[in-house]
Amino acid sequence: MDFLRFKQSFERAKLLPVYAVYGEEEFFIHEAVSLIRSRVLGKEETGVSLIEIEGAEATFPAVAEELETAPLFGSGGKRLVVVYGADKLVARSRNQLKEYLESPSPFGHLLLVCNELDRRTSLFNKLNRMGGTIACKRVQDEQLPSWMMDRAQSYDKRITLDACNTLAENVGNNLSLLAGHIEKLTISVGKRREIRPEDVEGLVGTDRLRDVFELTGAVARKDFPKALKILDQLLRLMRPGEEIVSVIPPLAWQIKRLWRARRILDGGGDREALTYSLRVPRRYVDDLVEQTRLFSEGELERDYRFLLETDIAGKVSAGNNKIVLENLIFKLCR
């Protein structure tokens, strides 16, 4: 089942002996694990009631032994075993997991966190019928406003569509960053219930959006010195504690939007179509059209791939991420 549907129904549903969480959206995976952990163990978590295992070398007999070990205290007599990176364990132990579903531990619950699940297997079908598969898919760009509105509603706030678009333009399709900004916005507006575009601009700044447009323009014109200068401006706008690689999501968002704009213009659309379909502020539409004409579709696909690769490299690197970003700009302008 889709994560958002799981989240809506989980508190009313019967607890299952086994859950399998999988997919590429880490924010949803983390949230699903937190929901199940909180529901099974409540506030009484102890080292006896919660067992966390890395799945690369895990064996089913060892996992089963943990599930069958009764908790000595706390957690209301429940025990949760979480196996991270459980893909190999699932592949090796499908039959044993199916048998376990027939006669599970009376107090143990198993949570398998996987990158992927083979939907063709009988294990998947059996677990799926029970409601135990949780697919954590990425939210598509066009679905982001709806997700942000639901997120704001959880704080008893309403965020306008224009405010959603302004936030996405500055942050990109990064649910962790978006969720953090929405939480800050709900606090900053105080007792007022509505979150407006000016609230977003006050939080993340209008200069960053302008600089992102200027940076993609410099890249389109292969102007490496100007692109580096704009990158420095973006880095100076960063807040204390903000990761340097956080400038990548809005750049990736802009490249994707240029690709979509090219499709609209090639299909006969005009500036009004861009404003309506892509929610582009009117003051940026002319820049968007100019940049779209400077990029080929192949260049946009290549540049988007470069951005994703750099985002991953920056997250795992212990080195100087400014150099990583400067190398990215060089590759984009090359």
Image: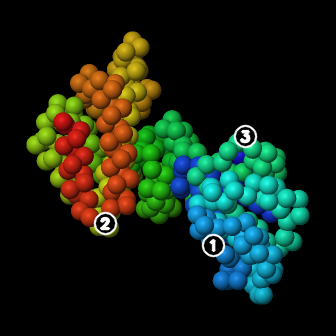
Q: Check disc 2 and give the amino acid type.
A: Ala
Q: Check disc 1 and give the amino acid type.
A: Glu
* Mark drawn on residue 52: 1
Horizontally, is 268 left or right of 223 in the view? right
- Choose mark 1 or mark 3, whichever is in front: 3
- For the residues bearing labels 1 and 3, Cβ distance under 8 angstroms: no
Q: Position of residue 297 (x, y in %)?
A: 34, 24
Please report whichever mark, 2 or 1, sits nearer to the chain's N-terminal start: 1
Please report whichever mark, 1 or 3, sits nearer to the chain's N-terminal start: 1
Give the color scheme: rainbow, by chain, secondary structure or one colour.
rainbow
Q: Is residue 272 visible?
A: no
Q: Is residue 109 above or below residue 266?
A: below
Which class describes the residues within 10 Å of circle 1: few (<14), some (14-19), or many (20+)?
few
The residue to which callout 3 is attached is 120
* Mark drawn on residue 318: 2
Q: Position of residue 15 (x, y in %)?
A: 80, 62
